[in-house]
Amino acid sequence: MILRGVAATVCCLAGAAHAQVSETRVHQLVALSCENGGSMETSEAARILPQEGFSMKETQGIVAFLEQRGHVIPTTGMGTLKLSATACQ
């Protein structure tokens, strides 16, 4: 699964914390979400992401990066990360 529109740069500034986000980790998080139907509830993320080595800070930076590029669909209450259809193609 390939995230369309992700810049070819290895690191980018994302979110208020200005965390560096690696393209590889963006692709890994997107792949995990796409394997889960294109969305991931907070409870699922809390279980799945640490097993894959994602910290809360890193995940927040990646989500901010994806939001800035229009790949996140807003959800009520922000309890679910939902990706746009193009993100999972």
Image: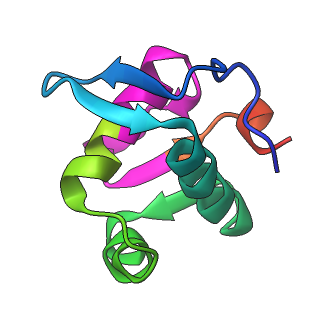
Taking depth in this image into account, of 81 and 31 the one nearest to the observer is 31
Q: Is residue 55 left or right of residue 9?
A: left
Q: Nearer the viewer, residue 89 or 28?
A: 28
Among the 4 quarters of the image, the one containing residue 88: top right
Please determine whether, in this image, residue 80 is positioned above or below residue 32.
Answer: above
Give 83 or 3, whichever is nearer the viewer: 3
In this view, the residue farthest toward the front is 10
Q: What residue is drawn where x is 41% and y is 21%? A: 12
Q: Position of residue 46 (x, y in %)?
A: 31, 75
Residue 40, position as x, y percentages in the image:
50, 62
User: Is any part of residue 41 visible from this angle?
Assistant: yes
Residue furthest toward the left? Answer: 17
Apparent side of residue 59 relative to residue 33 in the rendered image (left or right): left
Taking the magenta stretch, the answer to whether it contains residue 12 is no
In the figure, is residue 68 to the left or right of 37?
A: left
Q: Nearer the viewer, residue 15 or 86?
A: 15
Q: Is residue 18 left or right of residue 74?
A: left
- The residue shown at (53%, 16%) is 69
Where is 14 relative to 44, above or below? above
**Where 80 sits versus 68, above or below?**
below
Q: Position of residue 83 (x, y in %)?
A: 60, 41
Q: Quadrant of residue 42?
A: bottom left
Looking at the rendering, the stretch of residues picked out in magenta corresponds to 62-81
- Judge whether residue 75 is colored magenta: yes
Task: State which quarter of the image contains the C terminus.
Answer: top right
Report x, y in % for residue 1: 82, 51
Tell me what residue is drawn at x 36 percent, y 83 percent: 47
Count of numbered circles on the image: 0
